Structures are given as C-alpha cells and as structure tokens.
Image: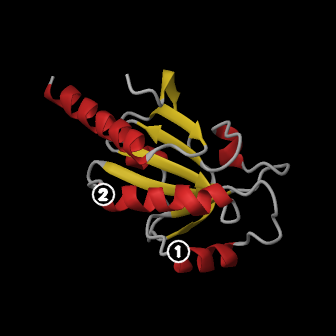
Amino acid sequence: MNPIFLTDPVPAPEWSVSEWLNTAEPLRLAALRGKVVVLHAFQMLCPGCVLHGVPQTSRLHQFFDPEDVAVVGIHTVFENHAVMTPDALRVFMHEFRVKFPVGIDRAGHDRIPESMRRYQMRGTPSLLLIDRIGQLRAHKMGQVEDLAVAAAIQQLVDESAENDRS
C-alpha cells in the first residue's frame, strides 16, 4: 500500500464552492465519478502553496490523462480574508499560469470555509485523492514529493482499471 494512502478510506463529501474559475461549468464531485480526482486545497498567500503545491498541481494537470484523472483546485481561505478576494485570485491564477479548474471555497459560518470543514483540513496546502467510486483515499497537509503523489495517482488509476476487467 502506498504510504500516503489513508488506512481506512471514507466517502468523500461534496465540496461547497461559491464560484468556479478555469471551467465553463461548475464541477461537482458526483459528476466526476469514474475518474480519479486530485483535489489541491490552497491559499494564494500561503508560501508552501505558492512554492510547491500550485506548481505540483499544475504538473499533475499536464501529465495525467483527463479521461482518467480530474485535477481540481480549491481556494480555501481561513485567514487574511480581506486581501484574498476572487479578483485577487484571478490575478494570481493569471500570473502563475494556473490552468486547472479552481473553485472558491464557500465561506462558513465562522472563519473556516465549508469544504475545509467538510474535509477536516488542518491548513494549506492540502492534497486529497479520491478514487473513481468517490472514496477519499489520501489526505495530506504540507509538501508531498512529486514521485509519491504520481505513484499514488497511478495506483488508483490502475486499481480502477483492474476492477473494470474483473
């Protein structure tokens, strides 16, 4: 078993997004069933996100076949709310050439956004892997090495293909 995987997978909750960028239609997790979903939660003022998480997610978006893998970002703001606006995020995405779809996490009843709460994220960057049947299989905060992430994604793709042949 890949070391970044959860010991006990759980059903992935639907994300809660107020606005989508880089996609013509809003993305729903349920509509992505049949694909492995890479969910990258970030904040544009988070150094680890800017230096590692967003570039890694961009590489994954370029590398994996979109027929098998959906790469999705979620901008989940739990601090510095006044400066991390949707307009500022659009500028950030343009400047950093972010091409993958990004949802803006819906504000919660307190300072913690709804998707962040649903997924029990502790901070950013957070990487979540969801298999083709909607099970949350990996949930890591902080930097995860590219090879470990790519191997885990490929394992989920291959696992799904093996199940299809059975």
Q: Position of residue 44 (x, y in %)?
A: 66, 65
Secondary structure category for the residue under label 2: helix
Residue 166 numbered tag: none
Note whether residue 59 is visible.
yes
Badge 1: how crowded within 10 Å, few (<14), some, or many (20+)?
Answer: few
- Above or below, 165 against 102 in this view is above
**Position of residue 37 in the picture relative to residue 143 (left or right):** left
> Is residue 110 or residue 41 the one in the foreground?
41
Q: Position of residue 128 (x, y in %)?
A: 51, 41
Point 39% across, 60% down: residue:
59
Which residue of the protein is positioned furthest toward the top in this rendering? 8
Point 78% across, 50% down: residue:
108
Note whether residue 12 is visible.
no
- Above or below, 64 against 133 in this view is below
The CA distance from mark 2 to mark 1 is: 18 Å
- Above or below, 115 against 50 in this view is above
Which residue of the protein is positioned furthest toward the left in this rendering? 165
Quadrant where the N terminus is found in the figure: top left
Residue type at the position of mark 2 = Phe
Q: Position of residue 159 (x, y in %)?
A: 27, 30
Q: Which residue is mark 1?
A: 96
Badge 2: how crowded within 10 Å, few (<14), some, or many (20+)?
Answer: few
**Position of residue 18 in the picture relative to residue 111 (left or right):** left
**Position of residue 152 in the picture relative to residue 65 (left or right):** right
User: Sequence-wise, which precedes: disc 2 or disc 1?
Assistant: 2
Residue type at the position of mark 1 = Phe
Residue 63 numbered tag: 2
Secondary structure category for the residue under label 1: loop
Quadrant where the C terminus is found in the figure: top left
Q: Position of residue 121 (x, y in %)?
A: 67, 40
Tags 2 and 1 touching, CB below 8 Å: no
